[in-house]
Image: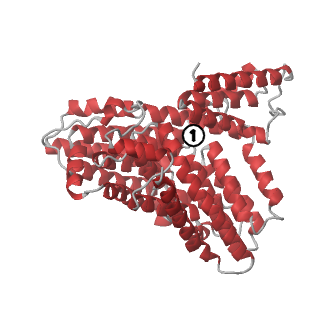
Amino acid sequence: MKKKNFVFLAVVVVIIGVFIGFALNTPAEIDPETYSPAVYSTIGALIPPVIAIVLALVTKEVYSSLFIGIVSGALLYANGNPELGLNTLLFNEEGGLITKLSDSYNVGILVFLVILGILVALMNKVGGSAAFGQWAARHIKTRIGAQLATMLLGILIFVDDYFNCLTVGSVMRPVTDRHKVSRAKLAYVIDATAAPICIIAPVSSWAAAVTASVPEGSSINGFSMFLNTIPYNLYAIGTIVMMIVIAIMKFDFGPMKKHEINAMNGDLFTTPDRPYGEADKEMTTPEGKVIDLVFPIIVLIIACIIGMIYTGGFFKGESFIDAFANADASMGLVIGSSVTLIIAFCFYMIRGVMSFSDFAGCIPEGFKAMVAPIMILAMAWTLSGMTGLLGAKYFVHDVVASYAGTLQMFLPAVIFVVAAFLAFSTGTSWGTFAILIPIVCNVFESDYSMLVIAIASCLAGSVAGDHCSPISDTTIMASAGAHSNHINHVSTQLPYVIVVSAVCVIGYIIAGALSYSNGPAIIALPVTVAILIGVLIGIKKITSRS
């Protein structure tokens, strides 16, 4: 028996044994008003995501791993009762699969995915992607240039991480392919310029989410606090520095090194899996021009921004900033992408490069290209819901609050680690900082300097954990944007995230100590960057010998 199959079977047997034990102690009649699972608000609440993540990394099977994690969460919530477990899995009002798929926000994201898939199919059909690739080949001469151009585009598209991942992937995939950059490396660059950029961009859906997480009635101005956290968001800044350094110094480490070596030898994928199949093959026409890709992308950016501020009340008198803060990202992206799809079709018809039958044929092609991320997202949302049903956030709240009084100087570093672990386990950075920000505000309300650093560490840790979690929607979107095998993306990205995170822990210890002693805490930023660059130089020297 193969090792991964043995591990998979062993885990399933253990899970079944545990749940049989629970079931034997579960009463036949359950009162919904007083019912509580045995592991509620304990470390056991994190068992389902841990099972899913470990299985995914060991077996390389993301769908079955996520499903087993969901099933384990449902059975833990039901204390092993099969009937209650099945109802929880499918119909629970807070975490069931059907509930998650009927949520208007989630459905909006899925619709946005499909429309983006159709747009990419249209751009491929008329030859826009191929024309842009040929143009880029004449102007971007090196692998370094291809990576830096991808980073720059990712930084420029800062309004929303979902939008960032899919747009950057569709535009830059032909360019990085021509310069033999592996799909895993492309997925890393896309992912690293999504959430880490959005979390330091004042005009973004993430800034709105952070602002909304400040407790009502608090004396703290949420948006002002967000602006003050930007120079202390060591993970976001460190990730940008790392991307640039490894691109310019021409080195990689960990599993990514193997992928990059294989790419330079002509294999962009390393593993045989091609989750996007025919979507990777460019369908070209002689009439294809760069404008056939650039024009729809520009329209998409403008339309999505307008769509988001429209949902936030901009056209009803709200300021631009307030409109972004109140925006419904899901609705805004659907509106923007729908308008773009119509305009793109009209543009291609006027140019004479597409017929209505061609357009109709691209609709199922775009949908098929997005089946993989849709499936993973649906299960990731459900798994996150199961974790919520088990009270994981209350467990984390109690852990952080219990140490707040005795570890004030080190609390920013502690918060960073706790946030990273929680975001990694649950796959949501927004959910993580929504849990931790109110705690931090209560602890440091009278010390604004330490409050800003602690909030920044919370945001940084949330992004770090989300960045490398296989069940994170942003990580899934990055895989989709790069047309990369999802587990390849996760396994190659993980060492990079760990390196930056480890350096950030040191940086937050320095920042906490300086703030605690009334020193200039901002010094932590250049010190952290210097340490990170030094670590990367050391890693290059070590890996160059192997």
> Looking at numbered disc 1 in the image, what kind of residue is underneath it?
Ile
Above or below for 328 versus 108 = below
User: Would residue 318 be visible to someone looking at this image?
Assistant: no
Name the image quarter holding the N terminus.
top right
Q: Quadrant of residue 406?
A: bottom right
How was the colour assigned to the protein in this rendering? Answer: secondary structure
Q: Residue 319, image x and y in percent?
A: 48, 67
Residue pictured at 37% horizontal, 50% vertical: 168
Secondary structure of the residue carrying tag 1 is loop
Residue at 15 percent of width and 45 percent of height: 351
Place residue 426 in its image quadrant. top right
Q: Position of residue 516 (x, y in %)?
A: 74, 75
> Image quarter for residue 458?
bottom right
Q: Is residue 99 above or below residue 466?
A: above
Q: Position of residue 535 (x, y in %)?
A: 55, 62
User: Visible in this render: residue 420?
Assistant: yes
Single out the residue that lies furthest toward the bottom: 519
Residue 464 appears left or right of 368 = right
Q: Nearer the viewer, residue 143 or 132?
A: 143
Residue drawn at 51 percent across, 59 percent down:
239
The front one of 287 and 97 is 287
Q: Position of residue 161 (x, y in %)?
A: 47, 52
Q: Which residue is mark 1?
A: 471
Q: Which residue is located at x 79 percent, y 20 percent? A: 20
